[in-house]
Amino acid sequence: MNAVSIIANVWFGDKERTVATALAGLAGPLGNMSSLIISGIAIAGYTEADLQDDLKNGGDDLRSRVKSILIVQNSIVSFFCILFFFLVKEKPEHPASKSSLEKPADIKMGKEMRNLLKDKNYVFVLIIFTILYGIYTTLGNILSPLFSPYGYTGA
């Protein structure tokens, strides 16, 4: 969770740091949502009756759909990982700001958490991310019974 702020501190100046942190923080939920969309497209129109028929016939239809989901998702992730390793250096050639040269301050966790919970904007974003995580978990649990006869689990 700290990687986003550390990368933003090293790579971006004072004026760009907030936007960089916000966009990088949204990358996880957007990636999760896109994976659920890909899964939904691959499973679209597959009903309980189709599942029963497929189980009687050896399960090849759903197995091939799950395989295509995994291939597409892993291809996307592999592409961006390879791109990341080739394009991103350890540090920029010139410091992005004075603060990127300074040693991080010693942080008292309890005091910082109290300050965060007093900030209405933070609480609002916390509620939104909690709702998004709930939706993501719920959709995963809805898709789980389709995958479980073939040995695929959410864990």
Image (tube, rainbow, N blue to C red):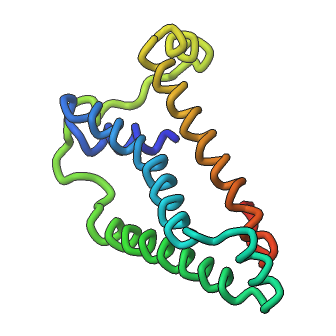
Residue 15 horizontal/vertical position (percent):
18, 29
Given residues 81 and 57, the one toward you in this image is 57
Given residues 130 and 3, the one toward you in this image is 130
The residue shown at (68%, 69%) is 47
Tell me if 151 is positioned left or right of 35 in this view: right
The residue shown at (77%, 63%) is 145
Q: Note whether 21 is above or below 91 in the view shown.
A: above
The quadrant in which the C terminus is found is bottom right
Q: Note whether 77 is above or below 115 in the view shown.
A: below
Q: Note whether 8 is above or below 57 in the view shown.
A: above
The residue shown at (32%, 30%) is 102
Given residues 16 and 106, the one toward you in this image is 16
The residue shown at (51%, 10%) is 115
Residue 7 horizontal/vertical position (percent):
36, 45
Residue 80 horizontal/vertical position (percent):
37, 68
Tell me if 5 is positioned left or right of 113 in this view: left
Quarter of the figure with residue 154: bottom right
